[in-house]
Amino acid sequence: MLEKRFDFATIERKQSRRWDERGAFKANVDSDRPKFSMVMPPPNITGSLHMGHALNMTIQDVVVRYKRKRGFDTLWLPGTDHASIATHLVVERQLASEGKSRFDIGREAFLQRAVAWKESAGNTIFSQIQRLGASADWSRQHFTMDAELTRAVNHVFGSLYRGGLAYRGKRLVNWDPGFRTAISDLEVDQREVEGHIWYLRYPLVGESGRYIVVATTRPETMFGDTAVAVNPEDDRYKDLAGRDVLLPLANRNIPIVFDQHADPTQGSGAVKITPGHDFNDYEVGVRHGLPLINILNADATLNDVVPEPFRGLDRYVARKKVVEALDAAGLLDRVEKKTISLPYGDRSNVVIEPWLTEQWFVDVSKAAAMSVEAIEAGRTQFIPANWANVYFQWMRNIQPWCVSRQLWYGHRIPAWYGPDDQVFVAESRELAYKEARAHYGREDIELRQDDDVFDTWFSSALWPFATLGWPEATKELKRYYPTDLLVTGFDIIFFWVGRMMMQGLQFAGDVPFRTVYIHGLVRDAHGQKMSKTRGNVVDPLDLIERYGADATRFTLMAACGQGQDIKFIPEQVEDYRNFVTKLWNAARFAEINRCAYDPEFDPAACDAALNRWIVGEFAVVAGHYEAALDAYRFNDAARILYQFVWGTFCDWYLEFTKPLMAGGDTRLADEIRKTIGWCLAGICHVLHPIMPFVTEELWEHLDGGELIAVAAWPRISALPRDEEIAAAFAWVMKLISAIRHFRTEMRVPPGSNVDILLKDASPTVRARAAAYQPLILSLARADAISTCDSAPPGSAQFVVEDAVVVLPLAGVIDIGRERERLLGELQRLDDEIATLDARMLNQAFRTKAAPEAIEKIEDRRAKAREARARLMDALSSISG
């Protein structure tokens, strides 16, 4: 017997154990069924479940559960990413609490700490993902630093190097002075801050008293200036061709160059060019053959290139002293306060510096072109399709990929250097020594390995095929690659999706996935991005604890429209928790009324119109639901089922059955009981991908055999629908709903039954009223239903399709007093609407009010107008 209350916490633990004990989610590489495969975007080992993860994992789980039940051999391959910088942050915080840094304890001791932390706490996010009900093949989970993935990483890099695509060179990179490493654009967070612009005077060489004013937000970088640029169309500077200026404090001459980079409308129209510390200036420097000067150390202190008074100073201390020195020399023109955008390291929280350093790069231009061609040919499809255009734009403007990081935790670059710095790139230390001995012609060679590690994205780019055993030709690789679906956010289309496409085509010989589903961001109820600083972060684990995983998942899917960000309203989780409760109570009703599931029952053979109606409605709903899931329209799928389960099945069909099961027709009652059991079983099947826990629990009580997670998808959508019966029940429900509405608006006492009269009724309506009279009288709380030629005095009248429905209310309510009440309510609503309209038309209010305040007023106005429309309907029904 089902418990009175759905205890989601107990049931989630129980059903998770059952799935695990029965190996419900394991792929079978030897299966003869069609396959469906996808890889889990590997969360960082330092991560914890947030709303973005919850959305991403729920989408994937809905799809894989649906495919599994549709008869596919499914592989959803899970794993985690070592996340070099994030792990460094964790371990270095531990060290900082001890008054140490990684440089104090050395590389080996640091790596030991990192591995120990990973082993003790690094898989926490897996248990959190499992709380959501994720049905991955947990027996196949991988880690980006597993031995087999390390072999794949080294193999790819060796191949790139031997093909001339991987090389070492000096270029500007995003340098994080906190971690002392290059970082990717993805790890740079642009923030608006209050800053300054300093206007500096650079004296013109050979012309005493004349100078050019340049503007900068970083005066300390002036020691790296190698030119001043002006626009060739700027008439103010046309006489300065071939001239130099004196770089203040450094006392060296630098040329004036003419370049479109200088904007005549900004500042003085002249800009200082620092190719070694600015990405735009670097491009100017390349165009004009300017030298690149690096003035910074790895920790963002000034190095020995700068004048002696500024050496060793922190960049911000140096800034202050540079400004003071310029002011003392009469070369500080002015200072302005201004809001500026600064690049911060998203982990270190320090300002990033463009820094000239030697790094490993990979030329990806050819691979990028291959990936564009593959998408244009339809080998991989983006959903929504517009994201393909974003992808093309990035790929067609791609730059060499900086793959090295100056960190210790990660895949160490497989490059070894000989005594003369000859480099040997090999897949292992042994192979590198073998090459070195052959090169030098002797055995006693000492090699040192490159200190850098790979960018985390370099290893994760191999995820779809390296996790299947590549470069070995494994059975898993042959069966499951290419994968069928990747679910990810738009923010990593280039950084991860693009790199997987390039590496998959280049090394695995095909695209890594057939479909890429791009979901939006989970925002708060007002459309704001969730952040700790705003205080609007919602923790999905809190929601699971409070409302259960099923309600949390359904809320996410109900809001998940294609190509849209999600406005997440926590209160809606409670609504969908009530939906779970509604289903649970329906199952209890069935159990109490002996409505068992009979697997031999044929719903197409039902005799009773009521049962034929619900079977037909379920068939249509199942068809629409399947189409929505097949097209990844998750919000439509959730809406379709919600309306059918709560509305059609629970609120209408089960209510219709109550008087019939209590009647004397045992044959009808038996068919109803079997139909209810069949409907509940079908609902459990189709709801299972979105709400796995409650459906598995109910299925266990209904069937008791195999898990619903692996049970075959029912062929509900193939069942027939009797259109005449469907139309009849649609009319019956409209009639009952209209009568219930007017009973409520007219304040008819719940215990008072009324007669129903049909005026000007068509023959079809008369036939339906006669055929379904018992259902209408029971649910409309009426004593009789008949036809009439005219409405008695004191009646409410309204139209339902081809008939005027008349409710004689004289003697049941005071018609006069009711009319006065309705008029009074209308006046109150008119006053409220007028007040709200006036506020919304007040431009001063709209300018100053917070968006959420405006949204609340608009919501109140909409509700007031809806209430007014209902009152007008009620008033018109008793007027005239």
Image (cartoon, rainbow, N blue to C red):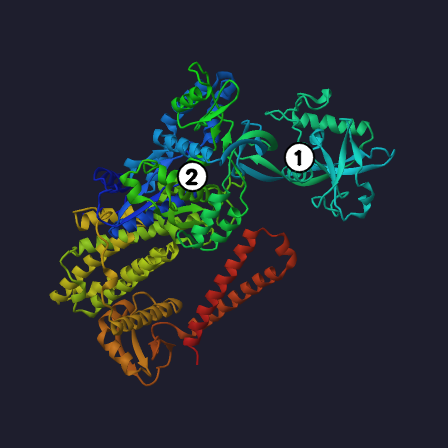
Question: Which x, y percent locates residue 318?
Answer: 69, 26
Q: Which mark is residue 709?
A: none
Residue that extends furthest to the left in the rendered view of this protein: 666
Q: Is residue 768 left or right of residue 524?
A: left
Q: Position of residue 273 (x, y in %)?
A: 70, 36
- Name the residue furthest top: 444
Q: Residue at x 72, y 39 (%)?
A: 337
| Residue 413 appears left or right of 710 | right
Task: Write down the quadrant of residue 238 in the picture.
Answer: top right
Relative side of 708 to 469, left or right: left
In primary-sequence order, the first of circles 1 and 2 is: 1
Amino acid type shown at disc 2: Ala
Q: Nearer the viewer, residue 500 or 318?
A: 500
Pick the front one: 542 or 440: 440
Residue 228 seen from this side? yes
Q: Would you place residue 281 above or below residue 94 in this image? A: below
Task: Determine which quarter of the picture holds residue 253.
Answer: top right
Q: Is residue 526 above or below residue 622?
A: above
Looking at this rendering, what residue extends furthest in the bottom direction? 789
Per the image, label 2 sits on a secondary structure element best described as loop
Residue holding disc 1:
275
Q: Which residue is mark 2?
A: 461
Residue at image position (50%, 62%) is 862
Q: CA distance from mark 1 to mark 2?
A: 31 Å
Residue 47: image location, x then y, percent: 42, 34
Quadrant for the C terminus in the image: bottom left
Q: Residue at x 61, y 56 (%)?
A: 846
Give the quadrant of residue 199: top right
Residue 246 screen position, x and y as percent: 79, 31
Relative to 412, say whether 275 is above or below: below
